[in-house]
């Protein structure tokens, strides 16, 4: 009735933003722009990144005549880390574009190095 959130968010999404330490703050105090239906969004990008990275790493390792399981392991690790780091992207479009380009370059270079390709 008073428009207050009664349950705290269990995760701190961005440690560089002091507003995230307020556990009763919902979607960076902007529920019109952002949504978080379950409050558990933190792990979804990590899992998606690990699965996609694992598949891509296995294929890339096979193409470079390396054991596919090494590419799978490294790809899952690099993809999961990239998914985790994507959570900290800036909200401004220029910053988020540059941040995303840096993540793609770092993950692509790491994947090529780990699977025996050209960096």
Image (cartoon, rainbow, N blue to C red):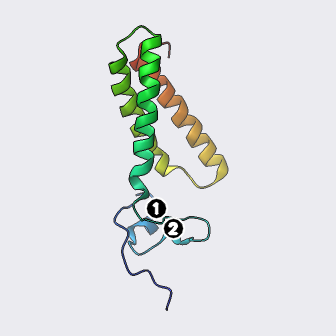
Residue 24 drawn at (x, y percent): 41, 75
Q: Residue at x 36, y 62 (%)?
A: 11
Find disc 1 in the rendering and name its residue. 17
Q: Residue at x 43, y 57 (%)?
A: 41
Find disc 2 in the rendering and name its residue. 28
Residue 118 got which mark? Answer: none
Can residue 110 be seen from the camera position used here? no
Residue 94 drawn at (x, y percent): 66, 47
Query: Which tag, 1 or 2, sits closer to the chain's start?
Result: 1
Query: What's the CA distance linking mark 1 and mark 2?
Result: 9 Å
- Position of residue 65 relative to residue 92, above or below, is above
The image quarter containing residue 55 is top left
Can residue 8 be seen from the camera position used here? yes
Instruction: Report the mark closest to the observer, 1 or 2.
Output: 2
Q: Residue at x 48, y 66 (%)?
A: 37
Residue 9 drawn at (x, y percent): 38, 69
Q: How crowded is mark 2: few (under 14 residues within 10 Å), some or many (20 or more)?
A: some
As rendered, which of 39 and 24 lies closer to the eye?
39
The image quarter containing residue 23 is bottom left
Dot 2 lies on which element?
Answer: helix
Residue 94 appears left or right of 110: right
Residue farthest right in this picture: 94
Dots 1 and 2: beta carbons under 8 Å?
A: yes
As rendered, which of 94 and 85 lies closer to the eye?
85
């Amino acid at each position: 009735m008073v428009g207050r959130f009664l349950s705290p968010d269990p995760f701190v999404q961005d440690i560089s933003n002091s507003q995230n330490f307020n556990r009763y703050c919902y979607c960076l105090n902007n529920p019109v722009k952002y949504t978080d239906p379950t409050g558990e969004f933190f792990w979804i990008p990590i899992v998606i990144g690990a699965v996609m990275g694992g598949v891509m790493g296995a294929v890339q390792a096979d193409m470079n005549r390396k054991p596919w399981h090494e590419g799978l392991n490294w790809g899952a690790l690099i993809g999961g880390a990239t998914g985790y780091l994507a959570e900290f992207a800036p909200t401004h479009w220029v910053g988020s574009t540059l941040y995303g380009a840096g993540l793609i370059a770092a993950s692509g270079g790491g994947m090529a190095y780990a699977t025996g390709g050209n960096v």
